[in-house]
Image: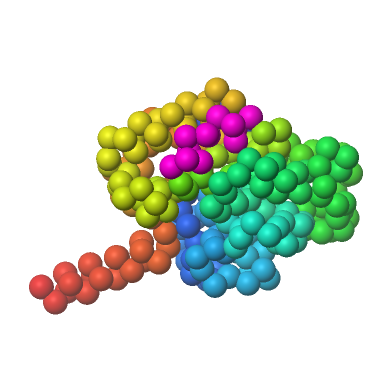
Amino acid sequence: MQNLVERVQAEGRGLLGTWVKIPSFETVQLIGHAGFDFVVIDMEHAPHSLDRANELVFCAQAMGMAALVRMPDQLGSTIQPLLDGGADGLLVPRVTSTNVADAISRRMVFAPKGERGLGTTSRAGRWGLAPMEDYLKRGDEQVLRMIQLEDWASVERAAEFAALPHVNGLFIGHGDLFLSSGKPASDPAVRELTAAMLAATKEAGIASGVAVGSPEEARSHLEQGFSLVMLSNDTTLFGQAVAEAAAAARA
């Protein structure tokens, strides 16, 4: 199995995804049928329980998509059960410290290199049927450990985060970046900062991620060379479609 970084390198293109906020198998299936490459199940800004997050991971993977999960916080209590549940990677929100990034990414890697415990009887280990070497290789080499940088000072230090031994992806959060700086993603200074972060990930050979609101922005960031581009989210995509259908019918 290739990890997402290997897929990007092998296919020569970035991958298109969206956030999953609706706790529904049906909407995840529709996203898969629409042709998305991956989803990120959002435990930070959506009311997903741990059980439902793991079920949505299974649903997305059954549809041929990679399934990442954005953790609810930096406490790390969900790391082991989500990785045991077979998630293809985890996003850690609102990281501002390289010490925090280093510590939490170590918990996603098996001992002795890291601090993750053995759980071969989990779904990630095919309920005990996977060879040990396959289980360990997937955990250490094929799981995305992506740190979200969402304030100006942290994004400026992207190269420092990219150099951490167990971090293999950086994600720029333009939404919270706007809250702290007052500058939208379209601002020239933000574009320059974004390009610098992207360059840092390429130099380090790790994945890069960004979230955008429109297909035009998605195409632009894919053309820039981002590994993972998140287009909108399920609630907005389905909500807009329903609103447009109703407005067109009434017109």
Residue at horizontal 67%, vertical 68%? 50
Relative placement, left or right, of 126 versus 48 is right
Nearest to the observer: residue 165 or residue 88: 165
By secondary structure, the bulk of the magenta-drawn segment is best described as: helix
Q: Is residue 112 above or below residue 65?
A: above
Total numbered badges shown on the rendered structure: 0
- Return the residue found at the far bottom: 250
* Residue 43 visible to the viewer: yes
Residue at horizontal 50%, vertical 61%? 20
In the rendering, at what x and y percent does residue 176 appear? 42, 53
Nearest to the observer: residue 149 or residue 243: 149
Relative placement, left or right, of 216 versus 81 is left
Q: Is residue 165 above or below residue 91?
A: above
In the rendering, at what x and y percent does residue 174 appear? 40, 48
Q: Is residue 146 magenta?
A: no
Residue at horizontal 30%, vertical 47%? 184
Q: Is residue 158 magenta?
A: yes
In the rendering, at what x and y percent does residue 169 appear? 59, 38
Residue at horizontal 31%, vertical 50%? 182
Magenta-colored span: 152-163
Relative placement, left or right, of 182 versus 7 is left
Relative placement, left or right, of 151 versus 185 is right
Quadrant in which residue 83 is drawn: bottom right
Nearest to the observer: residue 232 or residue 74: 74
